[in-house]
Amino acid sequence: MIERYVTPAEFRRLVSALLVVAVFISIAALFAFLVVPGTRNVNEPGGDTAVAAVQGETGWLDPTEYPAAARQLIPPVDPKTVLTPTPELLARGQALYSQTCAPCHGAEGRGNGAAGANLRPAPRNLTAKDGWKNGTRIEDIFKTLEAGIKGSAMVPYDYLSKKDRMALVHVVQSLGKFDHGASDPKAREALERVFEAAGEEIPNRIPVSRAIELLVKEARDGAGPRADRGEKGPGEPEPEAGPGGPAEPQETAAPPPAFTAQEVGIDEKLGRTIPLDLILRDEDGNPVSLRSLIDKPTLLTLNYFRCAGICTPQLNAVVDVANRTDAVPGRDFQILTVSFDERDTPEIAAEKRTNYLAEIKRPFPPSAWRFLTGDAATTRTLADAVGFRFKRMGDDFVHAAAIIVIGPKGTVTRYMYGVTYVPADVQMAALEASRNEARPTIAKFLSVCFGYDPQGRRLVLTVTSVAATVTVVAAVIFVVFISRKGRGRQPGPEERA
């Protein structure tokens, strides 16, 4: 049937052209797959078995040198490489201490950190010998980091790898100049087996919205063992016995949920202008208006500085993307972190700023990342303006995690959710914000098909964009060619006969 539209010679030319296009697309796709970052998912979940350890000088694979994937096991660690405080371990431990411990325990470990001022019991003085619940030996401190201390603000650090926890142990021990005591041989042997045992599973992560749903369900179903298993609390009498024996435990109504999914989350306010006349406090306690700060593309995060949950992973992700993006801090973008807890003070903000700036390993002017505080009404107004919904629960808050991108005129231009951010997305968001262009959360064509050249500050085509574009163009050419030949060619005399 195709002979009615094209001659055999034209058909051969068309097939040849399409073959050339197909070969070009295949070469471009292969190049993109092998070379261009981001076209392969190196973190794709694997099987349930540990990765094979490569044979090095010690015969062990350092987990930090392997790109571990969710639901995979990273290999065991040679105890000899972690139970001795090497300079590398101490440097890693000091970085972790500055981020996770110093706000409460203080930079020198004396328990005088600004974030721990209102904690009861107060943070431990790590330089003092007495009063340690689990002891001060290396295995004792590791146990504390692994399990936490019930009834205190010391939560388990089980989200850190075993090697990172041991790096923290060495730093904690170094703060106290007293004799920590010799290790118990049996305890030491048990600790070595922890590192020699099967590797650790990389924890899964779920979206904040899903976490909120689970928390709401848990609140509806009743929290704790008493609601789930009928266990009595301390000091409660045993159930009275009836004629037929002990009384059956009475079902109690589940307490109402502490919050609902509608109370916590984010309502996008794309294209809206935030109130730039709001007055906050900078790290020195001086009043400062948003208008005086927001004069360039701004990445806004809303957190509170005592947060033991999602805030730390989010700010760590901001550090990571600040280290890896090609956009120039202080010129192409800046970061504002605003606490919505009125109890956070400028002193705490200054300490947080110092700690996080220390983690950025590239030239980064301090003015490009500000940590701000304010009264409850002011920070609530800012949160409402960008659609950030949070709720106080006791001394803490329930809230989501997102970077809210603000243009130089105060326009909300983009939302970037979660605690993992792609440098290219940040570059594109900064470029859009510089033009006060509001974009939906799902990126449009240009955001996907073009990259950003930080030197020329312009959009440039990427290899994968070329492959996709050529495919579309080839399909259009084929359709147009067929349709025009079908309309334009008249049957010859032999065909009419």
Image (cartoon, rainbow, N blue to C red):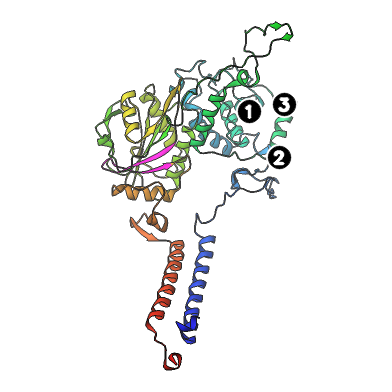
Secondary structure under tag 3 reads: helix
- Using the image, determine if residue 319 lies above or below residue 482: above
Measured as percent of width and height from the top left, residue 420 is found at 48, 42
Q: Earlier in the sequence, mark 2 or mark 1?
A: 1
What secondary structure is marked by label 1?
helix
Judge the density around disc 1: few (<14), some (14-19), many (≥20) Cα neighbours within 10 Å. many
Q: CA distance from mark 2 to mark 3?
A: 19 Å
Q: Which amino acid, by three-letter code, is at mark 2?
A: Ala
Name the quadrant containing residue 264. Answer: top left
**82 inside magenta stretch:** no
The residue shown at (43%, 31%) is: 262
Residue matched to label 3: 187
Looking at marks 3 and 1 on the same chain, the residue that comes earlier in the sequence is marked by: 1
- In the picture of the structure, the residue carrying the numbered disc 2 is 198
Side of 396 where 217 appears, left or right: right
Give the magenta range.
Answer: 400-416
Of residues 294 and 141, the one drawn nearer to the viewer in this rendering: 294
Mark 2 to mark 1 CA distance (whole Å): 18 Å
Give the mark nearer the N terminus: 2 vs 3: 3
Looking at the picture, how far across and down is residue 107, in whole percent?
Answer: 47, 26
